[in-house]
Image (cartoon, rainbow, N blue to C red):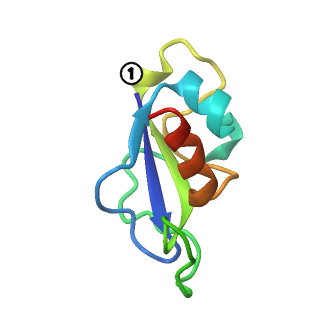
């Protein structure tokens, strides 16, 4: 299963994940693409952007959505790399999609 994380701008990648979904589900519902790849799995202290004022709404302060994909999830899917992938949608949009499937 791919692990979905919400990441605050300028904050280190830490804490519990938001959800676990299949690679296919993430592609179909969150718009995950192979070219969203940003870092290998062993990457420590993943940080994106610069710290700014927190946003509004239920995902206050969370801006970015990272999907972690490991080798078990890839299977025979060619064109994908293990590691962290940054979605084109923000945490608010992803949260709405995830809520629809809970």
Residue located at (66% from left, 35% from top): 34
Q: Is residue 38 visible?
A: no
Other-residue count near label 1 (Cα within 10 Å), few / some / many at <14 / 14–19 / ≥20 = few
Q: Nearer the viewer, residue 45 or 90?
A: 90
Instruction: Reply above or below: 37 against 71.
Output: below
Q: Which of the image's four quarters has the C terminus?
A: top left
**Nearer to us in this view, 99 or 45:** 99
Q: Is residue 56 visible?
A: yes
Q: Residue furthest left?
A: 15
Left or right? Give the position of 22 relative to 85: left
Say how many tags the image has: 1
Q: Quadrant of residue 21?
A: top left
Q: Which residue shows up at 29% across the image and 54% down it?
A: 16
- Across and down, in percent, residue 4 comes to 45, 44
x, y percent for residue 67: 50, 44
For residue 10, side relative to residue 15 (left or right)? right
- What residue sits 53% from the left and 51% below the top? 95
Q: Please identify the quarter of the rendering in which residue 52 is found.
A: bottom right
Q: Which residue is mark 1?
A: 72
Badge 1 marks a residue whose secondary structure is: helix
Q: Residue at x 68, y 36 (%)?
A: 33
Indicate the position of residue 10 as horizontal and vertical percent values.
50, 77
- 80 vs 19, nearest the viewer: 19
Q: Is residue 47 above or below residue 92?
A: below
């Amino acid at each position: 299963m791919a692990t979905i994380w919400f990441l605050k701008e300028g904050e280190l990648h830490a804490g519990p994940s938001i959800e676990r979904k299949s690679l296919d589900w993430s592609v179909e519902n969150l718009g995950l693409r192979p070219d969203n790849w940003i870092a290998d799995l062993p990457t420590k202290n993943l940080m994106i952007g610069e710290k700014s004022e927190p946003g509004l709404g239920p995902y206050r302060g969370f801006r970015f959505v990272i999907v972690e994909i490991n080798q078990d999830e890839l299977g025979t899917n060619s064109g994908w790399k293990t590691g962290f992938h940054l979605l084109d949608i923000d945490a608010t949009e992803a949260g709405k999609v995830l809520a629809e499937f809970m």
